[in-house]
């Protein structure tokens, strides 16, 4: 298993959504920025919406989501103890139930989920203002992309990759787009800081691509 250094110092600072100048400077310096975009209540609401969608699927009985507490009592999404149950380490029984109720591609990467609660996050006024600050223009759009449910012990190990084809990037042109990741629970993110710099992109393209844009 690959090991990556844990970042410390200024890159780990979490910004409030209204600190647009601080966010822009942090992004320009490191190529990334941590932002407290959602409250804990908003995170919990989205977790429940995601699990409620799974719980209501018209599956055969053996594939329906059924979770149980330590007293062998079934816990549904609407129940008071649901969030505490789903956010703590799952029992073997609940892991199996979650795996069976999820689509097969959970074994490749993660279950892909797509509905209005995730789209609403992308259209939050705070998120739009952050995007405007980073790209330096008011006319911004978001992608109707998916949400991901990464399950314990499921999915392939994540690997470093580009979210954009560098062969198409002019490193000296104004920034037109960037990628973001909203996390509803505690997790980790691997980032290669400084790779947004024009000097790095130019050197990377020189080292890796031939004159026709093909990998060497």
Image (cartoon, rainbow, N blue to C red):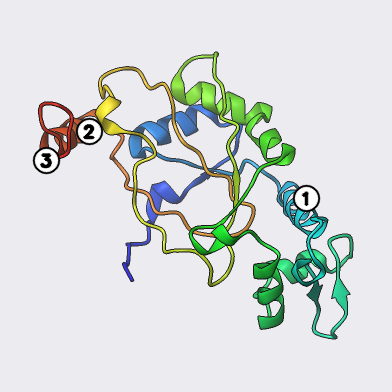
Which numbered disc, 2 or 3, marks the residue closer to the eye?
A: 3
- The residue that label 3 is drawn on is 216
For residue 106, above or below residue 196 = below
Q: Residue furthest front?
A: 60
- The residue that label 1 is drawn on is 49
Q: Which tag, 2 or 3, sits closer to the chain's start?
A: 2
Residue 201: mark in rendering: 2
Pick the residue in front: 199 or 152.
152
Q: Residue 215 appears at what percent x and percent y?
A: 17, 39
Quarter that holds the C terminus: top left
**Dots 1, 3 in contact, CB < 8 A:** no
Q: Residue 15 appears at what percent x and percent y?
A: 54, 41
Q: Which tag, 2 or 1, sits closer to the chain's start?
A: 1
Residue at screen point 78% across, 55% down: 48
For residue 103, above or below residue 207 = below
Q: Which tag, 1 or 3, sits closer to the chain's start?
A: 1
Pick the residue in front: 35 or 95.
95
């Amino acid at each position: 298993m690959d090991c990556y250094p844990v970042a410390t110092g200024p890159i780990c600072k979490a910004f409030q959504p209204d600190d647009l100048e601080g966010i822009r400077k942090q992004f320009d310096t490191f190529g990334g920025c941590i932002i407290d975009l959602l409250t804990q209540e908003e995170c919990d609401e989205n977790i429940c919406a995601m699990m409620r969608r799974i719980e209501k699927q018209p599956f055969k009985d053996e594939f329906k989501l059924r979770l149980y507490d330590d007293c062998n009592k079934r816990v549904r999404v609407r129940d008071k103890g649901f969030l505490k149950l789903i956010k703590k380490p799952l029992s073997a029984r609940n892991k199996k139930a979650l795996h069976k109720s999820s689509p097969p591609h959970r074994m490749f990467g993660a279950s892909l989920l797509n509905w209005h609660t995730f789209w609403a996050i992308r259209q939050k006024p705070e998120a739009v203002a952050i995007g405007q600050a980073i790209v330096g223009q008011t006319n911004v759009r978001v992608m109707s992309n998916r949400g991901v449910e990464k399950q314990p012990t499921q999915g392939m190990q994540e690997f470093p990759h580009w979210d954009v084809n560098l062969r198409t990037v002019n490193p000296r042109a104004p920034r037109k787009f960037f990628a973001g990741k909203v996390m509803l629970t505690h997790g980790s993110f691997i980032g290669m800081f400084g790779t947004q710099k024009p000097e790095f992109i130019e050197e990377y393209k020189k080292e890796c691509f031939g004159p026709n844009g093909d990998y060497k």
